[in-house]
Image (tube, grey):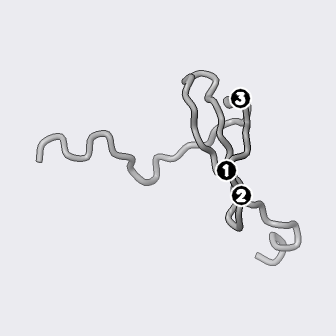
Amino acid sequence: MEGEGRGRWALGLLRTFDAGEFAGWEKVGSGGFGQVYKVRHVHWKTWLAIKCSPSLHVDDRERM
């Protein structure tokens, strides 16, 4: 179909963001897989949800 796939996210096109690009960090949830925050992107002027995965402990990194 013509135009199929437009507007869809392709895997591998993820980028990292700097925490300074966001304002108004409000924790909305947490669990075993990390915390979720409601934030406002400074330049895009949109509200987003950001999931912060738990980091590995130093001991865990050394075992890998």
> Could you tell me the amino acid type at mark 2?
Ser
Seen in the picture, residue 16 relative to 42 is either above or below; the reply is below
Residue type for callout 3? Ala
Q: Mark 1 — residue?
A: 36
Question: Which x, y percent locates residue 54?
Answer: 75, 61
The extreme left residue here reads: 1
Residue at left offset 67%, top offset 64%: 33
Within the image, what quadrant is residue 7 found in? top left
- Label 2 and label 3: CA atoms lie apart by 19 Å
Nearest to the observer: residue 1 or residue 37 = 37
Q: Where, by quadrant of the figure, is residue 22 drawn?
A: top right
Residue 30 got which mark? Answer: 2
Q: Are marks 2 and 3 in contact (CB under 8 Å)?
A: no
Q: Nearer the viewer, mark 2 or mark 3?
A: 2
**Tag of residue 17:** none
Coordinates of residue 60 in the picture (x, y in percent): 82, 73
Q: Position of residue 20 (x, y in %)?
A: 73, 30
Residue with the most extreme right position? 59
Where residue 55 appears, as percent x and y from the top left, is: 77, 60
- State the CA–CA distance, disc 1 to disc 2: 6 Å
Q: Residue at x 69, y 36 (%)?
A: 18
The amino acid type found where label 1 is placed reads Val
Disc 3 crowd rating (10 Å Cα; few below 14, some 14-19, many 20+) is some
Q: Is residue 6 left or right of residue 25?
A: left
Q: Residues within 10 Å of mark 2 (few under 14, many from 20)?
A: few
Residue with the mark numbered 3: 23
Residue 4 appears left or right of 41: left
How many residues crowd around disc 1 within 10 Å: few (fewer than 14), some, or many (20 or more)? some
Identify the secondary structure beneath mark 3: strand
Image quarter of residue 27: top right
Q: Are marks 1 and 2 in contact (CB under 8 Å)?
A: yes
Q: Is residue 20 above or below residue 36?
A: above
